[in-house]
Amino acid sequence: MMPLDMLPIGQSAEIAEVLGDQNDVKRLAEMGLSAGVVVQVVQQGSPCIVRVAGSTLCFRECDHLQIFVQPVASVA
């Protein structure tokens, strides 16, 4: 398991855990970022850009929010 922001560009991973303020975690879940969902990193850093369920999401770093993922094999 590793932080989402450590994932290389183009790598896919399954979200294992989202930690942080309850309202922030809920907001991310509403956007599709929750445990069990597979994401792909488009851009690292801040802003971080990921693809999830056919959408592209962009978000900035937050000291109170941590997204941990488990890398998976990329689907061609």
Image (tube, rainbow, N blue to C red):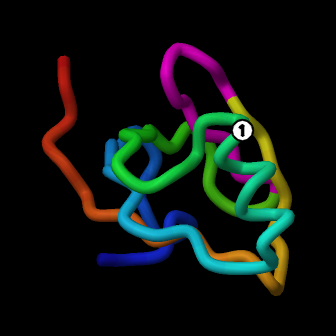
- Give the x, y percent position of residue 42: 56, 37
In the image, the segment drawn in magenta is 47-56
Image check: 9 left or right of 21?
Answer: left
Residue drawn at x 78%, y 72% is: 22
Residue in view at x 72 percent, y 34 percent: 57
51 shown above or below 33 = above
Q: Could you say where residue 39 lies in the image, as x and y percent from the top left? A: 44, 40
Corner quadrant of residue 38:
top left
Amino acid carrying mark 1 in the image: Glu
Taking the view exactly as shown, the residue that stands out farthest to the bottom is 63
Q: Is residue 54 above or below residue 43?
A: above
Quarter the C terminus occupies: top left
Magenta highlight: main SS: strand
Whole-percent x, y for residue 70 in the image:
28, 63
Closer-to-camera residue (46/71): 71
Q: Is residue 55 above or below residue 58?
A: above
Local secondary structure at mark 1:
helix
Residue at 72% in and 79% down? 20
Q: Nearer the viewer, residue 17 or 3?
A: 17
The residue under the point 52% across, 30% down is: 52
In this rendering, position of residue 9 left or right of residue 33: left
What is the quadrant of residue 30 in the picture?
top right
- The quarter in which the N terminus is drawn is bottom left
Horizontally, residue 58 falls left or right of residue 75, namely right
Q: Which residue is mark 1?
A: 30
As for residue 48 lying within the magenta part, the answer is yes
Membership of 30 in magenta stretch: no
Is residue 21 placed above or below 13 in the rendered structure?
below
